[in-house]
Image (cartoon, grey):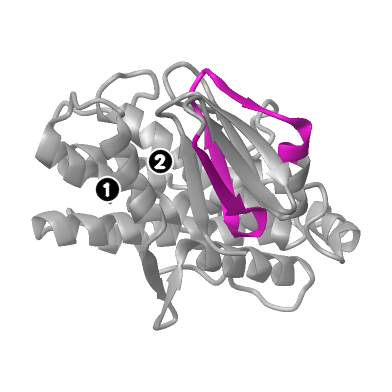
Amino acid sequence: MTDTVLDLSERPAKLAVRMGLLVILQRDGGETTLPLEELAVLIVSHRQVIFTQAVLAGLAQAGGVFVACDERHMPVAMMLPIEGHHLQSERFAQQAEASRPTCKRLWQQIIRAKVRAQGRLLENLHGDDRGLLAWAEKVKSGDTQNIEGQASRRYWPALFNDPGFRRNRDAEDQNAQLNYGYGVLRAIVARAICGAGLHPSLGLHHHNRYDAYRLADDLMEPYRPVVDRAVARHVWEKGAAGPLDKEAKGALLRALGARYTLKGEERSLFDIAARMSASLAQVFAGERRDLALPEV
């Protein structure tokens, strides 16, 4: 499977499946096809896109993810394949039996990677990491000192050069772009988790009883600065009040489709997420201690 992300938000369409192809039929009679095996994430945000059951089944069988959006084009639902690995039931059991100390150690690694990535992003964009690189090394098991929260309060105003900026999921400013980018990122990571034979609901740290993708929310943390960087650059060019339009979405999807470094090798975010998920399965199986984390 390749790493194609398709967002249908610009015009009405009807989706169908024909001989392993996703068929996109436009109202003017135009037709576009794409092999289902090449589609990693299908995002439907236009209110007049119609699709058949065969589209959902075909996408799932090919290992892809379906994301539905609301009237604001924000991701609100996600469909993942049921079977992602031949050892799935065994890995589910190992995941459920993971000890609390193991989960806390893994969360320490995740938050260190996240804060380090935030610091590197500030350094790259503004020439000053605002002390986040040093803070990253202070994260303890389970992040008992809440370094993540402390870093966040320093990070967001610095990122947008706006002392008054706050992360608010309901705001209509650049927060809307962040929401969209994180929604797609969540789908990418959830897909990787399923591919590794793990269950996306069994989290390491997030414990919201209404969150069906707690593990995805855990593992996506080090990747968030990928979205943040794209949004920051778009804000500089268009302003904080810029709409979540085709151009803004395109910038985010290009960032999520770019290549990043893992142990000195340039790889796609899809591949890095898959490797991190596979390393987590190995930790649960007692075959290693540390996650394969990216250098964003």
Residue 131 in the image: above or below residue 216: below
Helix, strand or loop for disc 1 = helix
Tag 1: amino acid: Ala
Residue on which the image places disc 2:
181
**Which residue is pictured at 46% across the width and 67% down the height?**
268
> What's the magenta region?
30-56
Helix, strand or loop for disc 2 = helix
Residue on which the image places disc 1:
230
* Quadrant location of the N terminus in the rendered image: bottom right
Within the image, what quadrant is residue 209 found in? Answer: top right
Name the spot of residue 222 as percent of width and height, x first.
Answer: 44, 56
**Which residue is pictured at 40% across the width and 29% down the height?**
10
Total marks shown come to 2
Locate residue 248 relative to residue 49 in the image: left or right. left
Name the spot of residue 82 as percent of width and height, x first.
Answer: 81, 47
Pick out the residue farthest to the front: 29
Q: Per the image, is 34 magenta? A: yes
Locate residue 135 relative to residue 83 in the image: left or right. left
Is residue 129 at least partly visible in the picture? no
* Quadrant location of the C terminus in the rendered image: bottom left
Q: Choose the circle earlier in sequence order: 2 or 1.
A: 2
Residue 6 in the image: above or below residue 129: above
